[in-house]
C-alpha cells in the first residue's frame, strides 16, 4: 500500500519497461553529448596514445548510439528528450581540468580519471538495460546493449593500462 507517496505522477505506467525507457533515454542523450566531449579531449590530451583512445571514443559513442537506436526500433520506443542530464557534472569537471592545468602528464592523469568515471557510468547503465531487456525477453536488444557494455569495459581497461605510464611521468614531472 502506498501512503504519503512523493510520486510526482509523471510516469504514466509503472512498469519494468518504463524503467528501461528512462535508462535508455538518459544513456542515449549522454552518449550524444559524449561524442563531442571526447573530440575535445583529443585536443586536450598530451600523450599520443591517450589521444588515440579518446579518438576511438568518438567512434564508439556513434556506434553505441546506433545500437541503442536499433533497440528502440525493435521495442517501438522513443528516447525521451526530457531525460535527466546525467553527465553534465563530469563534462564540467573536465572543462575545469582543461582550464586549470597546462597540457602535460598531470592534466592527462586528471582527464583519465574523469573519462573512467564516465565509462563506469556506461558499464553500469548498459548492464542494467541489458538485464532488463533479457527479463523482457528481448534477446537481440539485450545483445546490442551487452556489446555497448563490453566496449565501455574495454575502454576502461585501456585507460587503466595507459594510466600506469602517464601517472609515472606525472609523478616524476617528466616533460
Ligand atoms: Fe564510452
Image: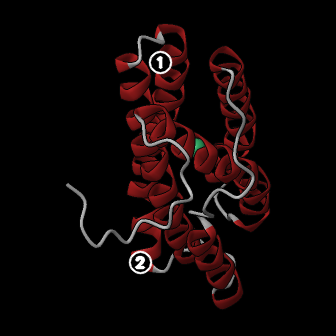
Out of 100 and 170, give the one closest to the viewer: 100
What residue did someone put label 2 on? Answer: 172
| Residue 175 is at least partly visible in this image | no
Quarter of the image for the C terminus: give it. bottom right
Out of 132 and 171, give the one closest to the viewer: 132
Where's residue 27, x and y in %? 59, 46
Out of 3 and 156, give the one closest to the viewer: 3
Q: Earlier in the sequence, mark 2 or mark 1?
A: 1
Label 2–label 1 contact, CB within 8 A: no
Q: Is residue 27 shown left or right of residue 150?
A: right
Quarter of the image for the N terminus: give it. bottom left
> Which corner quadrant of the image does residue 131 belong to?
top left
Q: Is residue 63 above or below residue 39?
A: above
Out of 21 and 122, give the one closest to the viewer: 21
Residue occupying image coordinates x 72% and y 19%: 73
Estimate how packed mark 2 is, as few (under 14), some (14 to 19) or many (20 or more) residues with alpha carbons within 10 Å.
few
Where's residue 63, x and y in %? 71, 28
Secondary structure under tag 2 reads: helix
| Residue 112 is at least partly visible in this image | yes
Q: Is residue 140 above or below residue 156?
A: above
Q: Is residue 126 shown left or right of residue 56?
A: left
Residue 142 is marked as 1
Which quadrant of the picture is home to ligand 1?
top right
> Which corner quadrant of the image does residue 86 belong to?
bottom right
Amino acid at each position: 500500500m502506498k501512503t504519503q507517496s512523493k510520486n510526482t505522477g509523471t510516469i504514466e505506467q509503472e512498469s519494468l519497461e518504463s524503467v528501461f525507457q528512462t535508462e535508455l533515454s538518459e544513456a542515449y542523450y549522454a552518449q550524444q553529448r559524449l561524442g563531442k566531449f571526447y573530440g575535445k579531449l583529443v585536443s586536450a590530451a598530451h600523450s599520443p596514445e591517450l589521444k588515440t583512445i579518446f579518438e576511438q571514443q568518438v567512434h564508439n559513442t556513434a556506434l553505441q548510439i546506433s545500437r541503442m537506436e536499433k533497440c528502440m526500433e525493435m521495442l517501438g520506443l522513443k528516447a525521451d528528450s526530457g531525460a535527466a542530464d546525467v553527465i553534465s557534472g563530469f563534462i564540467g569537471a573536465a572543462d575545469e581540468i582543461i582550464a586549470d592545468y597546462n597540457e602535460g602528464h598531470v592534466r592527462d592523469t586528471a582527464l583519465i580519471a574523469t573519462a573512467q568515471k564516465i565509462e563506469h557510468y556506461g558499464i553500469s547503465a548498459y548492464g542494467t538495460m541489458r538485464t532488463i531487456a533479457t527479463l523482457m525477453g528481448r534477446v537481440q536488444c539485450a545483445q546490442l546493449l551487452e556489446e555497448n557494455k563490453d566496449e565501455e569495459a574495454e575502454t576502461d581497461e585501456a585507460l587503466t593500462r595507459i594510466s600506469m605510464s602517464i601517472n609515472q611521468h606525472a609523478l616524476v614531472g617528466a616533460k
